[in-house]
Image: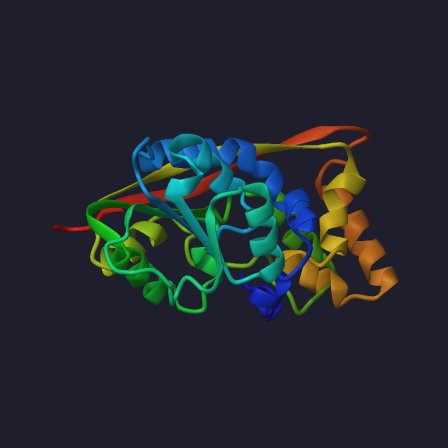
Amino acid sequence: MTSPTTDVCKAFVVPADGYDRLMGRYLPTLAPAFADRAGIKPNMRVLDVGCGPGGLTCELVARVGAGAVAAIDPSPPFVAACQERNPGVDVRHGSGEQLPFDDNSFDATVSSLVVGFMSDPDAGAREMVRVTKPGGILAACFWANTGMPLLQTFWAAAASLDPNLSGQMQLLGSHEGDLAALLKGAGAADVEQGELLASAQYDGLDDWWSPFELGVGPGGAYVQSLDQPQRAALRAASNDRLGKPAGPFTLEARAWFAKGIVPS
């Protein structure tokens, strides 16, 4: 299944609070689970690739201290938000495919919900290996294609109304084995994989829908391409698929995870 062609980089050059309302609300549960599985511990120096507004960065700071964390993202608004929210962290504007850090700089390099949006994920993975010390940790996670009801609901509703769509975006990392293969292809050893669980609470349908109206992510970019009657129809179709919630509700989500070691 495919979604409309979208410049995903532009889809994330949006106010940080918009991302917070779309994906950021899953980070309080996803980030600790990811950091645990990655094995992030005190006295490590850690790089967060594709840090966004800093949801995972904040968890890394809590574990190793701000001075031991670096972060990078291609979205200027996200870089500014990450800097403001994580004082003392070395936050830079740039892409994962060309990391502005020296070889063997970090004990662990992690990337959460990012590789599927890279223009060249293989290059990004090789860069993660390059900047990580021999024996250091590489880890990545990405939403499972059948494990993210927020996105499944949106794209299924969109496909029910638009004959040019066939459903949810299929991005690298969203299928079992994608992340493990990516790390192995970049030269990582002792690669393991598994699942992470996360959840988010919503006050109601408006709370769920509003980030799409702000243009956040590929879904938001698609909504912004619609006129008002089309948006209303998509909102109504999404509401039907969510079961027409009358009040607050919670969505559970599942992400694929992979971890490897830089060979010495």
Residue drawn at x 57%, y 65% as measured from the top left:
8
Question: In the current view of this chain or complex, which residue is farthest to the right?
Answer: 229
Residue drawn at x 28%, y 53% as measured from the top left:
105
Residue in the foreground of this view, choosing between 252 and 28:
28
Q: Is residue 174 visible?
A: no
Residue in the foreground of this view, choosing between 76 and 8:
76
Q: Where is residue 138 drawn, in percent x and y?
A: 29, 47
How is the structure coloured here?
rainbow
Q: Is residue 235 above or below residue 201?
A: below
Asked whether, in this view, residue 193 is left or right of residue 159, the answer is left
Q: Is residue 160 visible?
A: yes
Asked whether, in this view, residue 52 is left or right of residue 77, the answer is left
Residue drawn at x 75%, y 28% as measured from the top left:
248
Asked whether, in this view, residue 233 is left or right of residue 221, the answer is right
Q: Quadrant of residue 220?
A: bottom right
How many numbered circles are shown? 0
Q: Where is residue 136 drawn, in percent x and y?
A: 23, 45
Q: Where is residue 102 drawn, in percent x and y?
A: 29, 60
Q: Quadrant of residue 10?
A: bottom right
